[in-house]
Image (tube, rainbow, N blue to C red):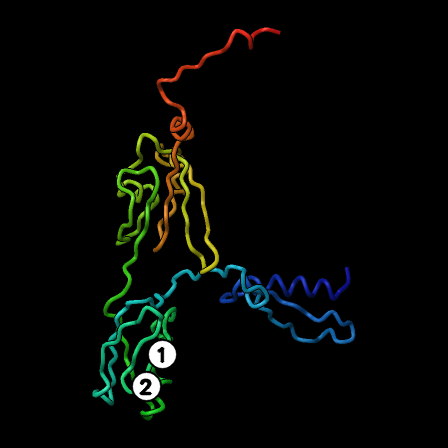
Amino acid sequence: MTRISVVTIVAALLFAFEPGVSVAQTTQRASDPDNPSKSPTVVNATQQDPDRPALEHRYPRYKIQRDDVLFLTFSLSPEFNQTATVQPDGYVNLQGVGSLYIQGMTIPQVVEAFKGAYAKILHDPIIDVDLTDFQKPFFIVSGQVGKPGQYDLRYDTTVSEAIAIAGGFTPQAKTQVFLYHRISDGWVEVKKLNMKDILHGKNVNEDAVMKPGDMIFVPEKFITNFRKYVPYSVGMYVSPQTLLP
């Protein structure tokens, strides 16, 4: 192994474990032996492959959605104080500056966007934004449960607790369930959980905590699904001819 390769591997490992650096980034060092001191360049993997799901933040900020209601306070220009509602197309209508697209932004990003818009008519505007109405966190349970539907996620709730909130398993339910979690617009993470073991005190650490927007699907037992197509009044009959050689 050449000295250049060793340096490249060590630099990649140090960069991968450097705090605050996303794992989705990689380090590339020039392989030109005439220029070994060239500084490494950082390449964002998500920029190279836009379809690749990005890693989630540990404590993600709320992102503005349709029908959210904002209250804008202008410290130096109170005449511009206003309540704004995000339209179905993601735009918000602002007094004096027109429409601005803010869907998917966090509150700090919205504040900066509003300051940029009002800087055209106000000198160095100071704007405070309060989120007065927003999409409440929820989870969905579907399939073979007593009360399938959407429920508010008001506190830390595990998959087993979510199933209990939805009325518990029906007699036709299979205890291997699926947990769907949306990572990005084009990616959904799916986990298969064995609730029979969890409910019997085994592998309880696998009882995942629900996140806003998660969905649990409880499938039907195979034998129950099969019986839908086999009438109970019909018995099995073997013709004597089939027993002949």
Looking at the rendered structure, the secondary structure element under dot 2 is loop
Task: Give how far across and how far down residue 222 sits, in percent.
Answer: 42, 30
Q: Nearer the viewer, residue 227 or 206?
A: 227
Task: Give how far across and how far down residue 144 sits, in percent.
Answer: 33, 37
Task: Give the class, few, some or many, for how many residues have Cα within 10 Å of label 2's Cα (few <14, many ≥20).
Answer: few
Name the residue rendered at 30%, 51% in the picture: 156
Task: Give the class, few, some or many, for how many residues have Cα within 10 Å of label 1's Cα (few <14, many ≥20).
Answer: some
* Amino acid type assigned to the residue bearing label 1 in the image: Leu
Compared to residue 154, the image places residue 123 above or below, namely below
Compared to residue 120, the image places residue 217 above or below, namely above
**Quadrant assignment, res 218:** top left
**Quadrant assignment, res 193:** top left
Task: Give how far across and how far down residue 28 sits, in percent.
Answer: 65, 68
Looking at the rendered structure, the secondary structure element under dot 1 is strand
Tags 2 and 1 touching, CB below 8 Å: yes
Q: Which residue is mark 2?
A: 97
**How many angstroms separate mark 2 from mark 1 (CA)?**
8 Å
Task: Give how far across and how far down residue 204 sits, in percent.
Answer: 38, 39
Q: Quadrant of the C terminus?
A: top right
Name the residue rendered at 36%, 32% in the picture: 200
Name the residue rendered at 61%, 61% in the picture: 13
Query: In this image, 3 relative to 130: left or right?
Result: right
Q: Residue 9's mark?
A: none
Q: Residue 100's mark?
A: 1
